[in-house]
Amino acid sequence: MPSSTIIDTVDEHLFESKYLSTTVQGDLPEGYTLCPLRSNDFERGYLNVLSVLTEVGEHTRDSWSTQFQYMKKHNDTYYAVTIIDEKLNRVAATGTILIEHKFVHKNGIVGHIEDIAVDSNQQGKKLGLRIIEALKFIGQQKGCYKVILDCSPKNVAFYEKCGFKAKEQQMAWYL
């Protein structure tokens, strides 16, 4: 039987739950749970939530599993979190912090926040704020000397409310 037709019976976590903030969990609305990205989040609509940000592309269960296992193998770098709507068993929000080990700042560590997304039907519940708080907590737990992110000008006010300050400019080179 091809692996694409087999659904994981075990829901693997991307990283240990010790990196999840109990404070953030306590601040979520009733019926919502903060989790590490899990291997069965493909079926919970993870990619649909990401599509509120940008084009996600076509994924199969196999391509999802390959990417998940790559990230899990490098779980000292990738910390993707989700907020699950338990009633629907669906991903309501997500975000990722990438951990970069540097030579500067005496081998310092920087957290890069990426891919903050809240399902369009779940907005207005402060789930984006809770995702940011969860990722900042992971950054603290991993010993980051700073946590940074890029955002569009329309989102600056939101991130300022989350404790971030505008600094410098982002540049991109698309291939």
Image (cartoon, grey):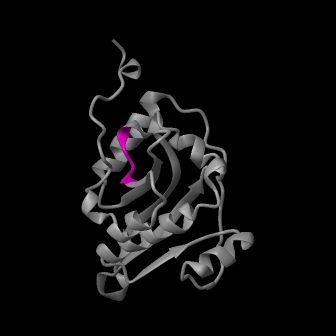
- Judge whether 4 appears above or below 73 on screen: above
Per the rendered image, the range of residues in magenta is: 35-39
Percent position of residue 157, x then y: 68, 78
Q: Is residue 56 left or right of residue 145?
A: right
Residue furthest to the right in view is: 154
**Relative to the observer, which residue lies in front, 93 or 111?**
93
- Judge whether 38 appears above or below 112 on screen: above
Residue furthest to the front in view is: 30
Percent position of residue 143, x then y: 30, 78
Q: Residue at x 64, y 61 (%)?
A: 124
Q: Residue at x 54, y 83 (%)?
A: 163
Percent position of residue 40, x then y: 39, 36
Q: Residue at x 46, y 71 (%)?
A: 133
Q: Residue at x 30, y 87 (%)?
A: 106
Residue furthest to the top in view is: 1
Percent position of residue 170, x then y: 64, 74
Q: Is residue 8 left or right of residue 130?
A: left
- Judge whether 20 appears above or below 86 on screen: below
Quarter-of-image position of residue 55: top right
**Relative to the observer, which residue lies in front, 102 or 55?**
55
User: Is 70 contained in the magenta span?
Assistant: no
**Relative to the observer, which residue lies in front, 48 or 113?**
48
**Relative to the observer, which residue lies in front, 65 or 107?**
65
